[in-house]
Structure formats: C-alpha cells, structure tokens
Image (cartoon, rainbow, N blue to C red):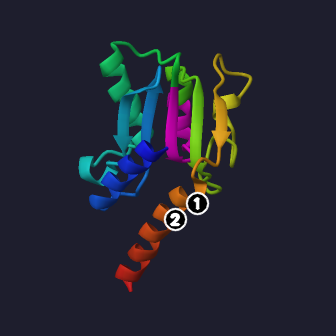
Amino acid sequence: MDEALAEARKALEMDEVPVGAVIVKDGCIVGRGYNQREMKKDATAHAEILAIQDANIRLGGWRLNDCDMYVTLEPCPMCAGAIVLARIKRLFIGAMDPKAGACGSLMNIVQDERLNHRVEVIKGIKAEECSALLKDFFRKKRIKKL
C-alpha cells in the first residue's frame, strides 16, 4: 500500500484527486497508476484503469489472473468492472468510499456471483493514511473556493 500511496501523492502534486494504485505479481510491481482525469481530460483516467493498462503492457496480455491490486480508495463501478474483466485475483483497499464505492460500500461488483470472475477483497489497509490524504485535498479545495 505504500507504493499505492506514493502514486496517490503524484496525483496530489498535479492537483488531481489523490488516488493511487499498483498491481503486483509474484512480489513485483507490474502496473502503476494515479488519477489523471484533469490532466488527460479523460473521465476514465482513474488510477485503477491506468494501473491495469500499465500491467497489460508490461505483461503482454489483458489477463491479470495471478495479480493483486492495491488501491488507496475503494474503486468506483467503472474501475470495479475493469478489475473483474482483468481477472485480478485480490484487491487490497485503503479507504472505503461510502458515496461511490463499488467493492462493498454502495454495491459489490467485484464479488457479484452473477459474474464469471470474483475478486478476493481485503479492506482497511492503511485506511487512516489513505483517508487523510483525500480529506486534506478536499479541505484545501473548499478553502480555495472561499
């Protein structure tokens, strides 16, 4: 999760919502991503999507069967769907997202029995640190608007 937090801090430096993700296979990081929606002007440029794309390139295929993802914030429905489609084995989540989370908060796409793949989910990894990064970001945004 420390590496996912490092990715989130990259987003923070670019004034993006500080969410980071890494994908690990056999103890090695094979994919990295951080939010880049504003910079790329792309609604799909979420940390998880970019980490999956990076891992696909590095591993030479779209199936990430034996890979784990670490992400600082519970994935949204789009990212949860991509995690299922990529066949990620385990998902380690920092902070939960009660407003938009799709891995146990609002819904649970990654463990929906109707889908052909389910992901093991481990929640609360460095949750306070992940949450603090996001809360500080949004607090500063609100202060700037005043």
Tag 2 residue: 132
Do tag 1 and tag 2 residues touch (Cβ < 8 Å)?
A: yes
> Residue, x 41% and y 56% (percent of image)?
18
Q: Amino acid at mark 2?
A: Ala
Residue 79 drawn at (x, y percent): 50, 37
Residue occupied by mark 1? 128
Left or right position of 45 against 97: left
Give the residues drawn in magenta, as a range: 68-82
Mark 1 falls on what kind of element?
helix
117 sits left or right of 82 in the view: right
* Residue at the extreme right: 113
Going 65% across and 56% down the picture, which residue do you hit?
98
CA gap, disc 1 to disc 2?
Answer: 6 Å
Relative side of 108 to 23, left or right: right
Under mark 1, the amino acid is Glu
Residue plotted at (51% across, 38% down): 70
Seen in the picture, residue 59 relative to 18 is either above or below; the reply is above
